[in-house]
Image: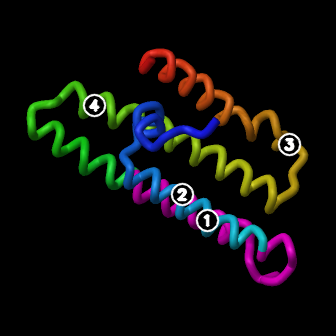
Amino acid sequence: MLFSLRELVQWLGFATFEIFLHGLALLAFSVLLVLKVDGQAPALSWWIVFVPFFAADGLSTYFTTIVSVRLFQEGEKRLAVLRLFWILTILSLKFVFEMLLCQKLVEHTRELWYGLIMSPVFILLQLLMIRACRVN
């Protein structure tokens, strides 16, 4: 079952532009990942492969800050703070996951086990389940 855009905006809390931005980042990441894995671009490091996600996170944070400031100026203080807190929580967990995964792929360390790498994703999924229950 696919979600409609309205449902994604409602459940994730992102604006349509932010969802589009993260979709473009996923597309660019996929292209870079294929080039890296197939050996077509051996000079690509894993950090370069993850740059589209890092850029999308940064732009989304900037966009969220602007929207929250405007909501705050319009008198919607509670909505501005809740939106800022929710989006920054999601983006922080996503960023930590990306950094840990990239570090694991670069260094191949045994101390960084996959349960630790996936823990931000597990927390994010629990938060999304709670939000989905509150929305419906």
**Residue 129 lies within the magenta run:** no
Q: CA distance from mark 2 to mark 1?
A: 6 Å
Residue at 74% from the left image edge and 77% from the top image edge: 44
Q: CA distance from mark 3 to mark 1?
A: 31 Å
Q: Nearer the viewer, mark 4 or mark 2?
A: 2
Q: Badges 2 and 1: C-beta atoms under 8 Å apart?
A: yes
Amino acid under label 3? Answer: Glu
Q: How is the image coloured?
A: rainbow
> Which residue is nearer to you in this view: 66 or 6?
6
Q: How far across and down, in percent of the image, does residue 91 sit?
A: 50, 44
Give the residues drawn in magenta, as a range: 35-60
Q: Badges 3 and 1: C-beta atoms under 8 Å apart?
A: no
Q: How far across and down, in percent of the image, does residue 51 sit?
A: 59, 66
Q: Which circle marks residue 23 in the picture? A: 2
SS at circle 4:
helix
Give the labeled residue for mark 1.
27
Q: How far across and down, in percent of the image, does residue 83 sit?
A: 33, 34
Give the labeled residue for mark 4.
81
Q: CA distance from mark 3 to mark 2?
A: 32 Å
Label 3 vs 1, first from the N-terminus: 1
Label 4 vs 2, first from the N-terminus: 2
